[in-house]
Amino acid sequence: MPSCSSNSSNLSGNVNINNITNSGARLLMTIPLSGFSGGRISGPIEDTDGVTAGDAIRYDAVVSSVSEGKYIKAQADSPANSEVVGIVEEVTPVNPVDPQSGIATIVISGQINYPESKLVTATHIDEDAGVTGSAGGNDIYFLSAATAGVLQNLAPVSPTQVIKPIYQVAPDSPWSGQVVNYIGYQSGGQIVAEQKDITPPGTFTMLPRYGGQRNSPEVGWELYGSKFNLSATNGDKTYLGLYDIVGNICKVTTKCYINEAPTSSNVGTFVNVRKDNKKVLVDGKIVGFNIADKTINVEWKSSNFDNIDKYLTEGRILNLSSGSLYTLSSFERMNFELPKVDSTTQLNSITFNIDNKPTNFSVEYYIYAPEDLVKGIKGGFASNAVTIPQDLTMSKVKVTDTIEIENSTISITNLASAIETIQNSIDSIGNQVHGTSQTDTDNVHVKNK
């Protein structure tokens, strides 16, 4: 039995018990404002200096930088700028009249009372998802690549920007959420492919009409006066992205869902929409209807471009020139039509000196109109294809669908099986010619044409 005498070698210590009710699980640090770049509380004008509650911060250890040895706002525009230390919970002034005095409380990990007004809805990344949030809703917030120190509800998407979740909404009074500060990773990885020869949507060009024949340029170029689909349920290609660029010069057709049943006599009738007894949408023309669905298709002039979303809202009254009134429940865009190039255009023909004889050719105008990357989602201008550099080394390639060979009708859905079939055929030919296979299976190369 161990001795219990006063000279016992047993260690005894103090047991400290604290009341931790409502204190949460938190790891904190405090930094005087003099430790920040700018050394002050941020004023009403946002800038990179100063600090305020809600800012995500990092420490700048770069020698000879402007903020060397200071804390500054973190930003997800590069790996170096996205190394978050923590989030400022509050700044307590020491001298109310001196913005350079004060102490900032930084939550490194755990529960925080975050100012909800500073959380950014990232509609600049995606107009729709920016409102509804990421996959889990508006619960996980990421470091912003656009503005230093800011938290936003969608991850940055541009190549080399850093995807770094740092805050999770998890109310537990008096705390609003948790500082999580997960490891960040670059969007697209560290290898970025850039297509420098891409043509901006809306670019136009002109082509002489040689020999009276229409000369269509490459895929994506369409003749002015063409009509483009806007409805994801009507055809395979949509052009919402292009419409955002050139819509103010285009007629657009909308399908309007109404509470009343339309009639065939409505076709050709003009439609106006009023607000405060003023016309805010004018001279729309009914070009189609569906009694069963209670819909009318209205073709609007280009002058209505900025007001269609604004005033085609639920409950709005459509005033028909026939005197009828329809109550709108909702609408969707169907298509839009570019104007034809007017005959008064100064350059509508070109003269070539052919065999010492001047010859005129009419000129036609084309617009670059790539389809949306995702059907029915505006803003997607690129095609569903990636061009890979000529020399690329990797340890493993996985093809989930089909390999198509350029300028060929051949497509391969199972590359391994196709190569095996080719190899078996080569072995068979070798046996027939030489009596034994003389093939080299270790040197199989696929090259560009």
Image (spheres, helix red, strand yellow):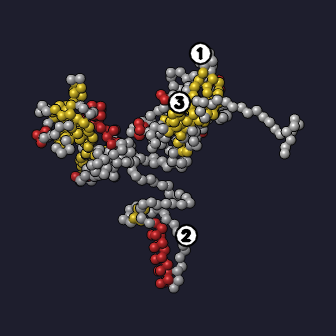
Of residues 320 and 369, the one nearer the viewer is 320
Q: Secondary structure at mark 2?
A: loop
Marked residue nearer the N-terminal end (2 or 3): 3
Badge nearest the viewer, 2 or 3? 3
Query: Pointer 1: what residue?
Result: 96
Amino acid type at mark 2: Asn
- Residue at 33% x, 52% y is 219
Up-down: is 318 above or below 33?
below
Amino acid type at mark 1: Pro
Could you tell me residue 338's position as x and y percent? 26, 41
> Marks 2/3: CA distance?
67 Å
Badge nearest the viewer, 1 or 3? 3
Query: Pointer 2: what residue?
Result: 443
Query: Pointer 3: what residue?
Result: 173
The answer to whether 241 appears left or right of 288 in the picture is right
Alpha-carbon neighbours of circle 3 within 10 Å: few (<14), some, or many (≥20)?
few
Q: Secondary structure at mark 1?
A: loop
The answer to whether 311 appears left or right of 42 in the picture is left
Marked residue nearer the N-terminal end (1 or 3): 1
- Residue at 38% x, 64% y is 408
The answer to whether 186 appears left or right of 211 in the picture is right
Badge nearest the viewer, 2 or 1? 1
- Residue at 38% x, 62% y is 407
Amino acid type at mark 3: Ser
Up-down: is 42 above or below 142?
above
